[in-house]
Structure formats: structure tokens, C-alpha cells
Amino acid sequence: MAVQFVIGRAGSGKTQRCFSAIVDALRAAPMGPPILWIVPRQATFSAERDLTCASGLGGYVRARVVSFEQLGHEVLAECGGGSVPEVTAAGRQMILGHLLRHNAGELKYFKNVAKHPGLAAKLDATFGELERAGKDARDLDVLLRDMRADGDDGALLDKVHDLHLIYNAYTAYLGAERFDQHQRLMHVLKCLGESHLFRDAVVYVDGFIDFSEYERRVLARLGRVCRRVEITLAMDPKSDLLTQPDLYPDELSLFHPVEMAYRRLRITLRDEGVPVDEPAVALPHAHRFKTPALREVERVAFERREGIRTRVAPDGVERVEAPNRAAEVDAAARRIRQLLRNGFRMRQVIVLVRDMEPYRDLINASFAEHGIRYFLDRRRETAHHPLLQFVRAVLMIAQQAWPHEWLMTLLKTGLTGLGPSDADELENYVLRHRIRGAIWEAAEPWAFHETALLRNEEEMGGTRSHQEVQGFSADAARRTLADALQPFIAATRGGASVRKIVTALFELIERFPVRRTLANWMAQARAAGEFELMIEHERVWAELSGLFDQMVELLGDESVGLAGFQEVLEAGLEQFDLALTPPTVDEVIVGQVDRTRPPSSTRAVLVLGLSEGCFPAVPREDSVLTDSDRRVLGERALHVAPASDRRLLDENLWGYLAFTCASDLLYLSRPRSNEANRPLGPSVFWQRIERMFPGQSMIALPQETRDDPALIATPRQLVASLMRWVRRKDGTHLPEPADAPWPRLYQWLATHACDQEGLDRCRYGAWRALGHVNQAALTPEIARQMFASPLTVGVAQLETVASCAFKHFLGYG
């Protein structure tokens, strides 16, 4: 029973060592003692796939790929702790939001923002930092007493007072009959000694950069009960910490976060009395890099020495400069298509960015246009999913007496049973007659006169006939909504409890065809091959149902009323996002450097966004603690997450990991300007590669990529470029160079019998667009009705027509 560390730099075969050892053990004894491969949660899917497909075993029994969270669930399931109700992350935020409002009078620092919807999420992140460091309410109590005894007086003292107050209230609210995630993990530690899952087991821990206090203690317990525990860490084998683990790592060390994790874990193992064998050093560059240039990038690109140059050819390293992010993403898509034509599989290609937000929509559009199957490895924000908008809308309608905006939102969710055309027609009817408020629930039928409106519509070129409009009954449509909503409004009047509101809400969902509509959407998404969308619909329903269960379990008898209920709900929805696994096996993975764990089979990695301020990224603060707060707390021996200056230094490690995860190709790109057309300088990582390979030719894309035929890769791009050429040619009347490719491309497009639906559709739209003359005019009759003579206008109308004629037409026409 001992722990052994396996130390090595990137590409030295640490993961391959774990994989090979597990496969060999499974072949030698398929029914032997348990084997556990513990990896980060986001890496479990790829590790399971490799163990199932790449091993050649065809299946296995004794091995398990788990994260620390899954391991905890299995331990509790065996020892009986799984029966204790668990408070999810969303439930925790709902409780914190409720306690903030309930204790607002006693708060000092957060008193004026206690009802702010984002404060509960910030406090949750702060408490998460404390728990990762192994601290709890008792540590806050000691800190608060020490600060008062030392005469501290300032914002930090008030902040600690509020944190202590809310954390104590939260712990008391949970009581002994419920566990949140942190308490459940502590319970797992108590059960580890009783579990039989790890008797004579072999454990491999791989892919981690840091460990929380809980994870360190779990590894120590495993080291005491398992036959062997191997822990791989990405560190320099020459590090002094391997022989002197009590040393503090060099602040400027590339592997500083990993070295700190190693130091803390060694101290925990020593405190628990777990023997540690001599560290094993993985063989340098034994398994990954296929070209000397990639080996040189790993060896010297992130060294502290300046001006490092190498004499090896830059084979396998490419750099591309694009005028903007859209052109950058298109260039990456073209390069992926080339790789696929050269024999690469989609799953062997990874696209990495430092921040997904500015690239998400561009990648969605470009990769779909280029026919690349891909998976965005990110948490899906579902705040605007139709089901959540449905719930928000009915709550606002019940509170505000049929507000127009939320009624229209309810109509547009598609969950009311009205089809899109009927919903649009009802909206138009309501707008025409300026229907607002309680008339929605009036007993008298709606029977407003439509003749003049229909006449005007026909005069303006309306396409709906008398019969089509007459076949729609606005009164019947509004009755569909009102009859379903009225019981919910009646049941939730006054200070209704959470349980009563949730019950009425589920009854309302049953009156509307919500579940049937969601099932139809899922079936349509499956038929169209949109598996992510199908899973998203399924998960949103499951997560929302679970959220309501948590609300009833935690706050069921609290009399909060609709306004309070919505505040609690919004606090829970702050973290309402989904983490999905890739729905198919062979697709390009697109992810963030600090989240995505590329599989060991990665051959090509495309790193985008290597511009100043993008990668390395500027640290952002998610908790209520500032850098100065963290330094003061550190001086008082309460260490939480590092300050922003430390995190900025740690960006070197993220760059190193991104640049060293491919075996064949490292493709680097950067935009020269942002969305506002402001110039962006090159990243320091870009400059390092530039200095390493001074003779390397870089691809610099032109400012207008549509003028270069070599950059055309899709039907839309071909047609758009030709349309631009035609317009430019007609406008200048200059002679065409003899070798110009555009006339030949135009002739090919005009005469080619296309069998590609996308090209045919683009070509058809282009012909119509080139021949269209955009001249809009009102008929004399409509002009006389809208602008009578003499014309009488107010100042507001004159200001509106001066700023925007179309806005004036809509508002006063």
C-alpha cells in the first residue's frame, strides 16, 4: 500500500503509461481486482472511449473510468449515504438568495445589494473557494474574531462579517437531514474506510493540474486502503521539489501550479501516514511528437530565456494572420478540410481557444457551412430556452395583470398549443386593436371590425386572403391561453407557498401541451441529425423539474408569494447551464484551453485567438474577494484561490498545454483586429514562436478575403465573391486582365449543371439579387390616407423623421 508519482513534461507518455498498464492488466486477468482510472470530469468520456475502442479489448469488467464526483457517488451508494437528500448547485444558490433577503437587515457590506440577482452566484463561488481550500464556517468565525481583536476596521471586516453570517445561516438551514455537495464530499471521506470497492485495487490518477483539499484527502485514504496508487503530474523531472517537497516552488516556474499541487499533496500524504515511493520519471518525448519542430516547441518555447532560436525546420508548425475573427475561423475550417482530405479523422483534430464567447457563433456558422461535424465543449447557456421563457412569462402574467410583452413572449415559446401562424396572427390582431390588460380574460367574445384593415393590407400588397384571415379566430386563440392561465392566477394569489406555486405551475404545464411539444422537438432534432439540440431539450426539462423538486424540498412551506418565488427561481437559474458529452464518436472537438482535455489520439491542434489580451487572458473575478482581500487573508493563514497576478503568470502553463497536445500539426492563428475594427497586437506566445523560427513563412490573409479565389471553399463564398466581382466590374468598366480567374468562374457557374442543392440555391438567389432594383414607393391612395393635406406634425414627429424615416413610418404611419 503506497503512492507513487509519475513525473514528466508534456508528450512524455504519462497517460500512455496509465493506458498501457490498465490494458495489460485486463488482458492478464479480466476478472481480477478493481482498477480505477481517475481523470477530470470533462475527460471521462474520451478516456472511456480510448479504453473501449483503442485498446482492442472489445469490453472490460474490472476497470472503471471515474471522476472524483463519480467516485464519491459510488462510495455513498455502497455505504448507504446516498439516501440523504442532496442539495444541488442550483438549490444552494436558491437558499443563498433566500437567506440574503431574509437577513438583509443584519448585513453590513452587502446590505444595499442583498436582493441583486447575481449576488447569490458570487457568494456561492466565494464559499466554493473556501471549501476547496478546506475551510468552513468555523474558520470564518476564527478569522472574524481575530480581525476584531486586532482592531481591523474596514470593508474587509464587514465583508467577512457578512460571509460568516450567511454561511452560518446556510449551514443551519441545511441541518443534519440534508447535504450540499461539500458536505456530501466530507461524508464520502468518512465512508472510504468502510468501503470494499478499493480492497486490493490499483488506482491511476491522471490529467490533473491541481487538487482541492477534499481530493487530496481522498487520495491519501486511497493510498492507505488500495494496493497501489499512481499519480501522474506534468512537471519538469529536474524540479527540486521531487527531493525536497517542503520547498516553495519558484514563482516564475512554468509548472508552478502543478508544483504547488505536488507539494500540498505530499504534505497531506505525510500527515496521513501514507508511504510514498520514489517518483518515476516518464521517458522524454517517447510517445507524442512526430516532428523535431514540435519537440522544440515543447522544450524551449515557454522557457524564461528571451531570444531563443532553433535551427530545426518548422515542419508541423503553421502560423496564419487573418484580418478579423470571422476570416480567422474560415481559414481554420479550410485547413481542417485539407487535413480530412489528407487522411486525418475528425476526432484527431482539436480546435482550442482561450475564451469561447467571441468565437462560438463564428464557429457555428463557418463549420456548418464547410460541412465539418464538430462538438463545442462548453456549458450551454439555456436562459432563453422556450421552456424557461414559458415559466417566466406565466409568472409575470400572474403578477402584472396580463402584461402585453410577456403575453407575446408566451405566444412565441411555441408551447401553448398555437401554431406559429396562429400565434403571429393573434399578435397582429392584438397590435391592430391595441388590446391590453384584463380584456384578455373578459367573458365577452372578441369581435372587432376587420374590413378596413384588410382593405389596407391588400392595397399594401398583403399576401393573406380574406378566407385565410377569416379562418382564424382571434377569440378562440386567446381563449386557449386565458382558460389555461386563469386557474394558475387564481391559485397563486396572495402569499402562496413555494409548494402551492410549484403544484399550480405543473398543473398549468399539463393544461398546455408542453411535454408533447418538447417530445416532438426532440424527435425532429433526432431526425435532422441535430443530436445536441435533442439532448438539450431533454436535459432542460429534466433540470427544470429537478430545480422545482429542490425548491419544494428546501423551501416548500415558505410563504413567498409570486414575486418572492420568482426571485428564488432566478437565483437558481443563475447556474442553469448544461454540460453535454459529444453525441457522436467522430467529430472535431472545439473547446477552451482551461476546460477541454484533448484525447491522447490528437494529431492536429488549431489554436485560435493568439492576440494581445486574448491569450494570455486577463483574469476575471467571479467571487466577492478582491486581490487585496486575498493577500490579507493569506497573511492570516486563510489561503483561497490565487490573486489575479498569480493567475496571469499561470497563463504560461495553459499556453504550454495548448501548444503541446498535438503529435503532427500545431496550427496557430490570430486576428489583426477585433469586432470594432480596432487593431490587435500579437500575443506573447505568438511572438515566442516567431522568434523560435525566424525563417518561417507566415500566411497573412488579405483584408478582403472575398477578392482571393484561393480562399473560396463553399458555394456561398463562391457566389458572394462573384457577385462582388460583377458589381465592381460594372462600376469601374476597366478591362479584365487576361489571367483573371473571375470570368472563367462566372462562366462555369452560369453553365454548370449543378447537382449540389446548396450551390443551386445560392446561384438562384444571386441571379435574382443582381437583377433586382430596390425602389420602394407608397401608392397615391395610401399616401393620401397617411399624410393628409394640410399636414399637421408635432416636434416629436419631426425629430423622429430626422433621426430615422423608417421609425417615423412605423410610429406615425
Image: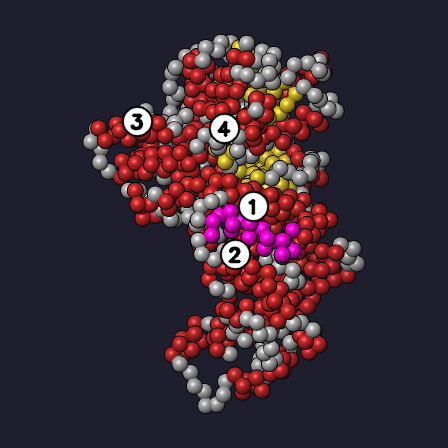
Q: Quadrant of the N terminus?
A: top right
Can residue 12 be seen at all in this image of the molecule?
no
Q: Secondary structure at mark 2?
A: helix
Mark 4 residue type:
Arg
Q: Residues within 10 Å of mark 3 (few under 14, many from 20)?
A: few
Q: Secondary structure at mark 4?
A: helix
Q: Residues within 10 Å of mark 2 (few under 14, many from 20)?
A: some
Could you say where residue 640 lies in the image, as x and y percent from the top left?
Answer: 38, 29
Marks 4 and 1, how far apart in space? Answer: 22 Å
> Which residue lies under the disc numbered 4?
184
Q: Main secondary structure of the magenta part?
A: helix
* Identity of the residue drawn at 55% across and 48% down: 382
Instruction: Count the marks.
Output: 4
Q: Residues within 10 Å of mark 4 (few under 14, many from 20)?
A: many
> Which residue lies under the disc numbered 2?
491
Marks 3 and 4, how far apart in space? Answer: 24 Å
Label located before the other in sequence (4 or 1): 4
Vertical order, 807 against 634 (above or below): below
Res. 544 mark? 1
Residue 531 is left or right of residue 156, and the answer is right
Instruction: Choose top left, top right, bottom left or bottom right for residue 583.
Output: top right
Mark 4 touches mark 1? (CB < 8 Å): no
Mark 2 residue type:
Ala
Instruction: Choose top left, top right, bottom left or bottom right for residue 543.
Output: top right
Marks 2 and 3, how far apart in space? Answer: 47 Å
Q: How is the image coloured?
A: secondary structure
Label located before the other in sequence (2 or 3): 3
Marks 1 and 2, how far apart in space? Answer: 21 Å
Q: Residue furthest left?
A: 151
- Is-magenta flag for residue 260? no
Q: Residues within 10 Å of mark 1 (few under 14, many from 20)?
A: some
Give the magenta part as a residue range. 496-515
